[in-house]
Image (cartoon, coloured by chain):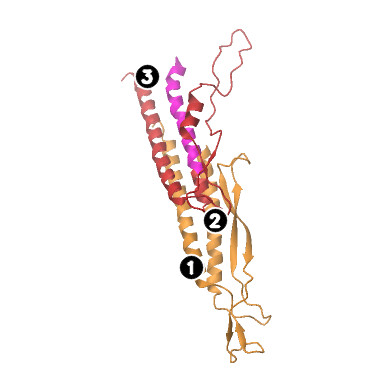
Amino acid sequence: MLNRITDALDFQAQALSLRSERQRLIASNIANADTPGYVARETNFAQALRDATGNGQPAAQLAASQPGHIAGNGPTSGATFSTLLYAAPSQTNLDRNTVDMDRERASFADNTVKYEATLRFIGAQVKATLSAITGQ
Amino acid sequence: MSMMNIFNVSGSAASAQSQRLNVVASNLANADTVAGPDGQAYKARQVTFQTQLVGANANDPTAAGVTVSNITEDQTPGRRVLDPKHPSADADGYVTYSNVNAVEEMVNMISASRSYQNNIEVMNTAKSLLLKTLQIGQ
């Protein structure tokens, strides 16, 4: 029963985890904008979220070694990007750095807004669950 | 909390950029110094950046900070000006000035300050997102 309440939150939690991971990746690209030879990285968000939520594979199963144990799904770990892609350089650079600052800034702003959206979704779901529990 | 690492990433980049700004400042300050008694004028300095992984997992490329790997001296010969009356003139009457190129340094300064600003902005955004995350369910 209780896990039905929290299952709805799980999807958004995985999305939030991936968003924060992506935020860090873009921050790394921006930080290394002047590092010679640095290669900018990108992610496939949709694929990663599908991998994290679609299969429904928990990170670890709880062992039911005694007759009285209830079989249950273990906690799912925070989703991460299993494969990182390379951003295609739009302009070549003498020091072989492939960070495109305009694109990174745009991605950063986009990711910020979507992170906040996910936060709002979670907040609304928590509020809805609370009002269902209290019945008021 | 992978967002916490953003402060390490952007903080290391801001620190590296401020070191670059520092080097630019000393280059510009010494733009007009002449060779001392040893005959060696000031040589322009340049920082070299290098990627430094700062994540909890040392092989995680998503937390890539920056460090200053070394500071190199520009070895091109300094500007030589004929001025026999100058106290620092050599036997031929030439004064050797430092090899700082002021235009290059100004460009370097603007680039460093823009990159610094970018990193500060990233940290501000990450901070406000973290604060909002703390208010989930309130």
Above or below for A18 versus A34:
above
Badge 3 amino acid: Ile
Badge 1 amino acid: Met
Badge 2 amino acid: Ser
- The residue under label 2 is B15
Dot 2: chain letter = B
- Between A29 and B129, the residue placed more toward the observer is A29
Q: Distance from label 1 to label 2 (Cα)? A: 19 Å
Quadrant of the rendering where the N terminus of chain A is positioned: top left
Dot 1: chain letter = B
Residue occupying the far left of the picture: A136
The magenta stretch is: A1-25
Residue A133: mark in rendering: 3
Q: Is residue A4 magenta?
A: yes
Which image quadrant is residue B126 in?
Answer: top left
Q: Residues within 10 Å of mark 3 (few under 14, many from 20)?
A: few
